[in-house]
Image (cartoon, rainbow, N blue to C red):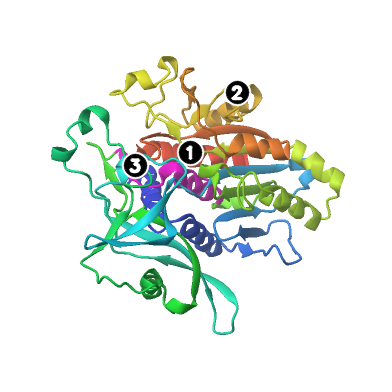
């Protein structure tokens, strides 16, 4: 098997064990521990040493890991790879259970901007975090995941929706998204029905469960496709593919023995604007970088000097050209699957790229023997954004927005190219190790 294929296989395994942002951070933490990374707590005093490997988790779904360089921060600055752990989709409402017409359904709220029609007719289930009271009366949290397909949003038959192929599937957000969970339930359902379901999955007593953050996920595993199996499909490629590339690029001998301080910052809440304690528009990354500096006996002025020497790659997926829909794309900026990472450029700074950071990234691509492409959105369609502009603005760090080309962004089943994942790992690795 080619290296690229092995790396994508590892990516698909990572996504399949990460049905929520909480699970993604747990999977990343397990990987880091296997490479001798040590957990740091925000409530503790940090004793960190050059050459050491560390990670910090904020609220279970954002994580920053770093290798403390052997040279002074003022000499090298930080090299930061940023990405996000969350994906758009459906979240279970607090009072979710609806019992009517011989069916039990769960009410959901929309998180970010999913393509809702893609959630129909899929083998859906539930994953996330529950908070509960321990025997001693403390508050604790536990990740929970139902393995089997539990929920479904059946489509309306074409006989009742004759124009679906002309007008597309439109779902009313309040009335038409509840997910079917069970048939023929008793009139009087226990008030703690959902608690009991969660108790079975988590092993926590139903009456101890106080609250939860649960999302809907697709139980279908990732797969390769295409005549040469040169493409792959899974949920959450945006943006677990970039998280995986960043972590993978950090975890090898050349990077783990680094003169420069290397950072992977993976945030929740990008899909809803990043404004939260653990989002990219919060203080998690600035706090962490500052604490790394102060714990290394670097003073305030030298910390600012280190930032001025730093660079961040904001990695988030890009829109690959789909030839069935030519009018959706800017004709001179078609980016192609399996043709390399995409540099994203936007005059209104929806992406953080500028000419110097672009030139630097191009140089790293050339050094890695990796092709690259440049993307610009159609001028008459509003462009999405990333954590790049927010984070670089907060830190004053030079930054670039890049990402691998993919199809069907925000579908529950996205797809991308096998070679691109390998290319992205290679170029991030060069970024981490280049002089
Ligand atoms: Zn994204």
Q: CA distance from mark 3 to mark 1?
A: 38 Å
Q: Which mark is residue 348?
A: 2
Q: Does label 1 or label 2 sit earlier along the sequence? A: 2
Which residue is more in the foreground, 111 or 396?
111
Quarter holding residue 405: top left
Q: Residue at x 30, y 53 (%)?
A: 221
Q: Main SS type for the magenta part?
A: helix
Direction from residue 366 to residue 184 in the image, left or right: left
Q: Which mark is residue 424?
A: 1
Q: Residue furthest top?
A: 332
Q: Residue at x 67, y 65 (%)?
A: 41
Q: Which mark is residue 3?
A: none
Whether residue 44 is situated above or below residue 368 in the rendered picture: below
Assign a secondary structure to mark 1.
helix
Between label 3 and label 1, give the one nearer the viewer. 3
Which residue is more in the foreground, 90 or 102?
102
Assign a secondary structure to mark 3.
loop
């Amino acid at each position: 098997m080619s290296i690229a294929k092995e790396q994508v296989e590892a990516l698909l395994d990572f996504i399949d064990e990460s049905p929520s942002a909480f699970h993604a951070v747990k999977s990343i933490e397990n990987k880091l521990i296997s490479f001798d990374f040590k957990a740091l707590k925000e409530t503790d005093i940090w004793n960190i040493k050059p050459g050491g490997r560390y990670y910090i988790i904020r609220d279970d779904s954002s994580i920053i890991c770093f290798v403390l360089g052997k040279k002074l921060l003022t000499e090298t600055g930080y090299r930061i790879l940023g990405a996000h752990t969350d994906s758009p989709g459906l979240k279970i409402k607090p009072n979710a259970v609806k019992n009517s017409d011989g069916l039990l359904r769960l009410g959901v709220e929309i998180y970010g901007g999913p393509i809702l029609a893609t959630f129909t007719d899929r083998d859906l289930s539930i994953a996330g975090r529950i908070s509960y009271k321990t025997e001693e009366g403390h508050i604790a949290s536990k990740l929970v995941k139902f393995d089997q397909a539990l929920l479904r949003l059946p489509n309306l038959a074409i006989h009742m929706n004759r124009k679906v192929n002309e007008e597309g599937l439109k779902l009313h957000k309040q009335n038409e998204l509840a997910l079917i969970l069970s048939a023929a339930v008793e009139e009087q359902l226990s008030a703690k029905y959902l608690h009991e379901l969660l108790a079975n999955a988590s092993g926590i007593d139903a009456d101890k469960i106080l609250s939860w953050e649960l999302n809907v996920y697709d139980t279908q595993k990732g797969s390769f496709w295409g005549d040469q199996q040169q493409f792959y499909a899974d949920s959450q490629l945006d943006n677990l593919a970039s998280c995986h590339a960043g972590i993978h690029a950090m975890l090898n001998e050349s990077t783990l023995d680094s003169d420069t301080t290397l950072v992977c910052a993976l945030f929740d809440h990008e899909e809803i604007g990043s404004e939260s304690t653990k989002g990219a528009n919060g203080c998690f990354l600035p706090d962490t970088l500052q604490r790394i500096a102060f714990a290394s006996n670097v003073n305030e002025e030298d910390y600012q000097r280190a930032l001025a020497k730093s660079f961040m790659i904001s990695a988030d997926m890009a829109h690959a050209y789909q030839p069935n829909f030519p009018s959706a794309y800017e004709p001179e900026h078609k980016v192609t699957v399996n043709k390399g990472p995409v540099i994203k450029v936007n005059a209104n700074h929806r992406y953080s790229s500028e000419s110097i950071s672009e030139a630097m990234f191009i140089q790293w691509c050339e050094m890695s023997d990796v092709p690259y492409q440049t993307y610009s959105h159609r001028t008459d369609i509003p462009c999405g954004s990333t954590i790049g502009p927010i984070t670089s603005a907060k830190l004053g760090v030079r930054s670039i927005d890049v990402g691998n080309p993919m199809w069907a962004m925000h579908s529950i089943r996205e797809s991308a190219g096998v070679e691109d994942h390998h290319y992205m790992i290679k170029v991030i690795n060069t970024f981490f190790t280049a002089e």
